[in-house]
Amino acid sequence: MSIKSEQDLNGMKKASEVVGETLYEMRKFARPGISTLEIDVYGYKILNSYGANPAPKKEYNFPGWNCISVNNEAAHGIPSKSVILKEGDLVNIDVSAELNGFYGDNGGSFVVGEDINNHIPLVEASQEILLTAIDRIKGGVKISAIGGFIEKEAKKRGFTTIKNLTGHGIGRKLHDSPRELPCYKDRFNLERFRKNSVIALETFISTKSRFVRTAKDGWTLFAEDGSFVAQHEHTLVVTDGKPIILTHNNGIN
């Protein structure tokens, strides 16, 4: 989507702030001994209080309101009453929703309780690389250059990036143009970021894997080799200078 009016900008701000607040509160609510279904329902109540429609359900009939992935699950994890969080689990919550015709999207990985499994370095890498990558985005910058930067920064820290999970454009649709914002340098992608466009930039940083596979449930994406994956995501508006981070209130800063 391209921002063409004050109405567009305000609509995107409101939708993004709602999903940002929801993610922030869901992360605070998560703790050892609680199920991912309980966290999902808690998040839905927040979205519903604003009149927002959870995008996974609305767009894809996903079997949950939000995506909650645990440990070796990289994305699109289905909330379940049988998945009880344990001390040291690596958890990812991805919240996206539609509000008054506009979509907001954000996500973040974190460790539940004490970091007994040493996941913090991976989580910090994903979060810090996202923020430094955002600072490099402006109109005219090659999309492949940002993907290459994310990949290079991950490698510096001893990590890899997932090649078959990407960020994307967003706006009046959950997935808009550009369709893919990879976490690696795709030399065949000659597209550039456009001023006033809205994107959901994501980092998918892994301990070892380069690809994820779909589980038997048809939704959950996981690292088959046992790797762990951390993801962080902001919705932002591309400008001539620093981007405007619309999901600034989600605590990923």
Image (tube, rainbow, N blue to C red):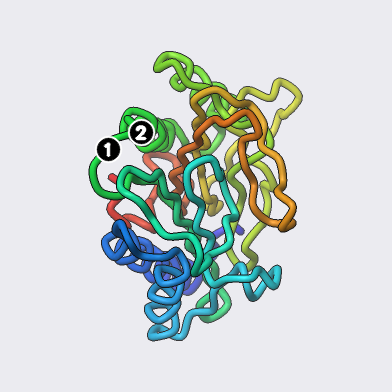
Q: Which mark is residue 119?
A: 2
Counting from the top left corner in percent of width and height, residue 214 is at: 72, 46
Residue 205: give x, y in percent of width and height. 49, 31
Q: Residue at label 1? A: 115
What amino acid is found at the position of numbered circle 2 in the picture?
A: His
- Mark 2 Cα shell of 10 Å, populated few (<14), some (14-19), many (≥20): many
Q: Secondary structure at mark 2?
A: loop
Residue 78 vertical position relative to residue 133 in the rendered view, above or below: below
Q: Which residue occupies the foreground of this view, 53 or 244?
A: 53
Residue at 56% in and 43% down:
74
Is any part of residue 136 visible from this angle? yes
Name the kind of residue labelled 1 in the image: Asp
Number of numbered callouts drawn: 2
Q: Is residue 102 left or right of residue 245?
A: right
Q: Position of residue 248 (x, y in %)?
A: 32, 55
Left or right placement of residue 59 versus residue 170 in this view: right
Question: Looking at the image, which residue is at 38% across and 56% down?
Answer: 85
Residue 14 in view: no
- Figure quadrant of the C terminus: top left
Task: Work out whether 46 lies above or below 233.
Answer: below
The local secondary structure at tag 1 comes to loop
Query: Could you tell me if the residues under marks 2 and 1 are in contact, i.e. CB atoms within 8 Å?
Result: yes
Q: Is residue 216 left or right of residue 209?
A: right
